[in-house]
Amino acid sequence: MEEVGEDELQLRGGGGDTKGESGKRMWEVFPGKNLICCRGRCITGPDPSIFIFNLVLTFAALGLFYAFIAIRLHPIVIVIGFILHGISFYFLLRAAFTDPGILRRRKKPSSDEEGDPPTAIVNGKTVQLSYCHTCSIYRPPKCKHCRTCDNCVEEFDHHCPWVMNCVAKRNYRYFVGFVASISLLCIYVCACSIAIVVISVTGDQQPAGVILCAIILILFTGCLGITLCGFACFHCGLIAQGITTNEYIKGRADGGSSKTGCTGCMKNCYDVYCTDLPKPDLNLMAPADVEMKNRGGSDEKMGDVESGDGGEKDDEIS
């Protein structure tokens, strides 16, 4: 088995000697900043603090709802609340712990770095590819190097601290599902809280603590629900156009068209929601030396790339 040299791999955290570590799995020597769980089966971002705060805030609000509001209305209210909560929690975990589309790094810088950068044809438009000096690869169209996770991510949308992960090709559907389901949950809790206040005002007097809890939930879930509904509609609009948040911001910043990926609303929605989840480019459970031999996987994704100068450069936001 081939020995993996120190110049080819680095341990997470920057310490340790990788020489003679050919028996290790890729998750043990992964060079990015991500947190890796379950021996390489799950990967997420480097900072869990906001994610944990998100969970605590959500469960606290729903605890108040179930204890003071839902129990005073009807058992079906509790059942619907649990269903919506379970759906949103499922999408949150999938968005947080799914590989977003991390591309493999090269062992060493590309020999073509000093030459003319390659170009790709995207919907009939020539796009000049950008070189990533950290990953030593030419980034495919829609790809961006996330400085938070320190990886090039395919079809990068944005890095979301609330789900503790990059939102990109492989977990975008789960992120949109989470935003949509938590929006519905907020609206549902707000409506039930309003119902308690109305019931109390119209005759069936409720305890002061219940009314106070209902008012807090109305203000919290009402503001959050309106914000998240707008956010969900924004992402649905991006999906219909076939663009990412990163492309949308670039289009506004440089005055260019942000509709470079639009191939029809229905097809774009189908591609996001109905196609099979793409296989990850990086296999964290594979032997490290085998995965290192197969590195530079982004080249396999650019069959339409052709060398040459000119074309419109795909400037990345950094």
Image (tube, helix red, strand yellow):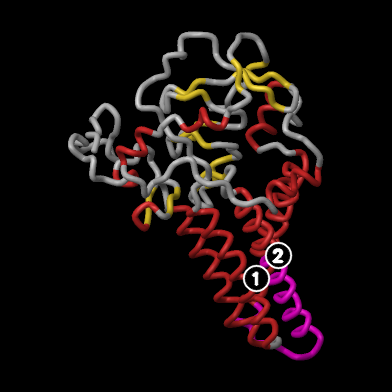
Horizontal and vertical percent for residue 23?
23, 45
- Density class for disc 2 (Cα within 10 Å; few <14, some 14-19, many ≥20) is some
| Residue at the spot 53% in from the left edge and 31% down from the top edge | 300
Question: Above or below — where is 283 with respect to 177?
Answer: above
Spatial CA distance of label 2 from label 1 is 8 Å
Residue 184 badge:
2
- Quarter of the image with the N terminus is top left
Main SS class of the magenta portion in the image: helix
Q: Which residue is mark 1?
A: 84
Instruction: Determine the secondary structure under disc 1.
Output: helix
Q: Amino acid at mark 2?
A: Leu
Question: Above or below — where is 203 with respect to 166?
Answer: below
So how many labels did they put on this image?
Answer: 2
Instruction: Determine the secondary structure under disc 2.
Output: helix
Whether the residues at callouts 2 and 1 have beta carbons within 8 Å, the answer is yes
Horizontal and vertical percent for residue 266?
80, 46
Q: Is residue 184 magenta?
A: no
Horizontal and vertical percent for residue 286?
36, 46
Question: Above or below — where is 292 with respect to 287?
Answer: above
Q: Is residue 193 magenta?
A: yes
| Residue at the spot 63% in from the left edge and 34% down from the top edge | 246
The residue stretch that appears in magenta: 185-211
Left or right: residue 270 versus residue 132 is right
User: Which one is nearer the viewer's eye here, 62 or 211?
Assistant: 62
Horizontal and vertical percent for residue 94?
54, 57
| Residue at the spot 35% in from the left edge and 27% down from the top edge | 107
Left or right: residue 41 versus residue 184 is left
Q: Amino acid at mark 1?
A: Leu
- Density class for disc 1 (Cα within 10 Å; few <14, some 14-19, many ≥20) is some
